[in-house]
């Protein structure tokens, strides 16, 4: 007796949950307070679209299945997009508690061998201090738009989150 008819025909990815939400509840609002101070409103359809664009951007940055991606951020819509965009790309997403001691944050990033870390605007000073001790990190992405990118920072290749999203189809 064969049970092949009961087997799933697609990989079991977190992104399928987001696709379901976008398909059946696409217009339901997702509301969060940004680090910049304002309230941001979006919906599940937009979260799915932006998560897919982020997945494309990560592939363009050289991320491959199994690569680890760290998030040093507070809860918000960009964090949600990153969670789904990373997990849906067969990458490994993990959050890093910004309240930990700096040496603990560095240890976690190095132990995980994070290729990319996403950072909220108000956590950038911590990351600037740590980057010299993070040889595995190839890209630091600041979770903000172009208008809020700091003019002065010590990271030679700091990327803007919204620029990554906007560059994709």
Image: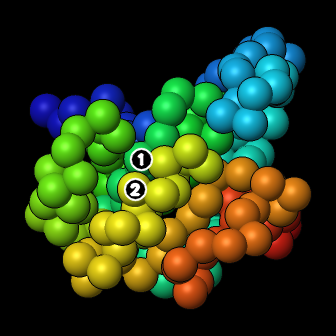
Q: Residues within 10 Å of mark 1 (few under 14, many from 20)?
A: many
Query: Nearest the camera: 168 or 17?
Result: 168
Q: Which mark is residue 140?
A: none
The residue carrying mark 2 is 126
How far across and how far down the image is residue 110, in percent? 18, 68
Position of residue 73 relative to residue 119, above or below, is: above
| CB contact under 8 Å: marks 1 and 2 | yes
Instruction: Identify the image quadrant of the N terminus.
Output: top left
Q: Which mark is residue 72?
A: 1
How far across and how far down the image is residue 33, in percent? 70, 22
Query: Nearest the camera: 91 or 118?
Result: 118
How far across and how far down the image is residue 134, in percent? 26, 75
Kindly tell me whether residue 64 is visible in this rendering: no
Residue at 55% x, 39% y: name it: 79
Kindly tell me whether residue 27 is visible in this rendering: yes
Position of residue 100 relative to residue 108, above or below, is: above
Position of residue 58 relative to residue 86, above or below, is: below
Could you tell which of marks 1 and 2 lies nearer the N-terminus? 1
Q: Viewed as shown, does residue 72 lie left or right of 85?
A: left
How far across and how far down the image is residue 75, in percent? 52, 28
Q: Viewed as shown, does residue 168 lie left or right of 117?
A: right
Rounded to the nearest angstrom, the CA distance separating label 1 from label 2 is 10 Å
Q: Residues within 10 Å of mark 2 (few under 14, many from 20)?
A: some
Residue at 49% x, 83% y: name it: 62
- Quarter of the rendering containing residue 80: top right
Residue at 44% x, 68% y: name it: 128
- Quarter of the rendering containing residue 76: top right
Position of residue 60 relative to residue 169, above or below, is: below
Q: Viewed as shown, does residue 50 lie left or right of 19?
A: right
- Quarter of the rendering containing residue 157: bottom right
Residue at 79% x, 13% y: name it: 28
Q: Nearer the viewer, mark 1 or mark 2?
A: 2
């Amino acid at each position: 007796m064969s049970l092949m008819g009961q087997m799933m025909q697609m990989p079991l990815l977190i992104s399928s949950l987001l696709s379901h939400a976008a398909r059946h509840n696409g217009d339901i609002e997702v509301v969060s307070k940004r680090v910049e101070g304002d309230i941001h409103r979006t919906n599940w359809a937009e979260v799915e679209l932006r998560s897919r664009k982020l997945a494309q951007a990560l592939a363009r940055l050289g991320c491959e299945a199994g690569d680890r991606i760290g998030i040093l951020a507070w809860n918000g819509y960009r964090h949600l997009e990153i969670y789904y965009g990373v997990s849906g790309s067969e990458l490994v997403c993990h959050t890093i508690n910004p309240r930990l001691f700096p040496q603990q944050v560095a240890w976690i990033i190095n132990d995980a061998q994070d290729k990319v870390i996403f950072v909220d605007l108000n956590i950038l000073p911590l990351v600037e201090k740590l980057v010299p001790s993070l040889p595995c990190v190839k890209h630091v992405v600041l979770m903000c738009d172009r208008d809020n990118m700091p003019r002065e920072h010590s990271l030679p290749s700091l990327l803007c989150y919204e620029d990554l999203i906007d560059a994709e189809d």
